[in-house]
Image: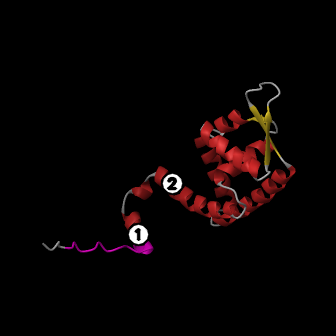
Amino acid sequence: MTKQRTPATPTLHSDDLSLAIRKSNLPDFTGYLIKRSWVTIQRDLRELLLGFNLSQRSMSVLSVVSANPDINQSDVAAALSIERSGMVVIVDELEDLDLIRRERALTDRRAYALRTTLKGEHLHDKVSAAIVAHENRIFANLSAAERESLHVILSKLVGN
């Protein structure tokens, strides 16, 4: 018995896909536009951070620890909405790279206090500058006022 083949569905090229989306009601939804913006930004950011042997989550942890020496590991996890098990993996990675130190907290021997190393501080500064350049490139088509407005609006949405 010979199985009949179904004709292949033609694949749309990116210009056609863009047109297909513009014809739909998706661009009318703010959430959809935020998601599409994030996909574009995070893809580029992921590549940038890989060049520093970091992920977005590990850079976030490094940033919070850098700004808050001796912060409790659980507090970092809560601030960044990272589950405890995920936080342990990230801290292990950063510690293995000699970017942070984990020590028993003085006030609670069950908890760990985190602090960046000198190497971690230098890398944090270098990566932060690279992220500024990344964002300047990504948002180049916005005026300074538009970019500031976007920042204010997004900060309100996330509760900052």
Ranked by sequence position, the earlier of labels 2 and 1 is 1
Where, by quadrant of the figure, is residue 51 drawn? bottom right
* Residue tagged 2: 35
In this rendering, is residue 152 above or below 8?
A: above
- The amino acid beneath tag 2 is Lys
* Residue tagged 1: 17
Helix, strand or loop at mark 2? helix
Q: How crowded is the residue under tag 1: few (<14 C-alpha within 10 Å), some, or many (20+)?
A: few
Of 22 and 94, the residue lying toward us: 94
In this rendering, is residue 123 above or below 22?
A: above
Of 56 and 3, the residue lying toward us: 3
Q: Are marks 2 and 1 in contact (CB under 8 Å)?
A: no
In this rendering, is residue 113 above or below 11?
A: above
The single residue placed furthest to the right in the displayed view is: 118
- Residue 138 pos. (x, y %): 64, 64
Give the CA separation, mark 2 to mark 1: 16 Å
Magenta stretch: includes residue 22: no
Q: Residue at x 63, y 66 (%)?
A: 141
Q: Residue at x 79, y 50 (%)?
A: 99
The label shown at residue 43 is none
- Residue 73 pos. (x, y %): 72, 36
Q: Is residue 148 left or right of residue 37?
A: right
Q: Which residues are magenta?
A: 5-17
The single residue placed furthest to the front in the displayed view is: 1
Q: Residue at x 76, y 58 (%)?
A: 127
The answer to whether residue 82 is visible is no
Quadrant (top left/top right/bottom left/bottom right) for the N terminus: bottom left
Main SS of the magenta part reads: loop
